[in-house]
Image (cartoon, helix red, strand yellow):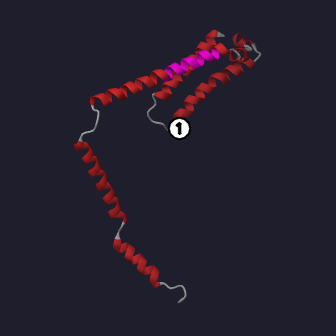
Amino acid sequence: MLGTACYGICVFVSNLILLIQTHNFTRYGEILIVLSMVAFFLILLIESKWQWSLFAPVNHMFSNMLGCPTIWFSMILATGSICLVEGLKQALIRGLHMWKDPSPKEDQISELYSNFSSQVNSSHAKSLDTNKLKSQKSFAFSQDPKAG
C-alpha cells in the first residue's frame, strides 16, 4: 500500500509541476493534466474492485488506502510543498528583476504613451469617416415613412 501511495504522490507532484510551468493556458492542457490526476484514483478503483488474479496485489486496496489519514496528509504535504517552492521561486525571480531595474525610465514611459496614443488616434480616424456618416444621415432623413 505504501508503494502505491508513493506512486500516487509522484503522479500528483509531476502533474502539478507541469501545470505550474505551463505558459500557454488553452484549457485543453489543463484538462489533460487534471484527468491524469483523476486517472490514478479511477484506475486504482477499477483494479481494486476487479476480483481476478491479474490485479491480486491491489485487491481491496482502494478503500484501505483512501481511508488512511496519513496517506492524505502526505499527499497534501508533498503537493503543498511543491506549490510553496514554486511560488517562492517566482517571487524571488520577480524580486531580482525589480532589484535590477526598480522603475521604468522616463523615456520608456513617454515612448509607451506616444505609441498608445498614436494607435488610439489611428483607430478613431478609421472608424469616424465623416463623409460616410453624412451620407447615411442624409439617406435616413430623406426617406419619410409617412410620405410613402
Residue 135 sits inside the magenta stretch: no
* Point 29% across, 50% down: residue: 113
At mark 1, the secondary structure is loop
Mark 1 surroundings within 10 Å by alpha-carbon count, few (fewer than 14), some (14 through 19), many (20 or more) = few
On screen, residue 83 versus residue 42, left or right, reads left
- Residue extending farthest to the bottom is 147
* Point 51% across, 19% down: residue: 81
Which quadrant holds residue 49? top right
Residue 70 visible within the image:
yes
Residue 54 visible within the image:
no
Residue 82 sits inside the magenta stretch: yes
Could you tell me the amino acid type at mark 1? Arg
Which quadrant holds residue 104? top left
Q: Mainly helix, strand or loop, the magenta region?
A: helix
Q: How far across and down, in percent of the image, does residue 39 sit?
A: 63, 25
Q: What stretch is highlighted in magenta?
A: 71-83
Residue on which disc 1 sits: 27
Q: How far across and down, in percent of the image, does residue 20 sit?
A: 48, 28
* Point 45% across, 82% down: residue: 141
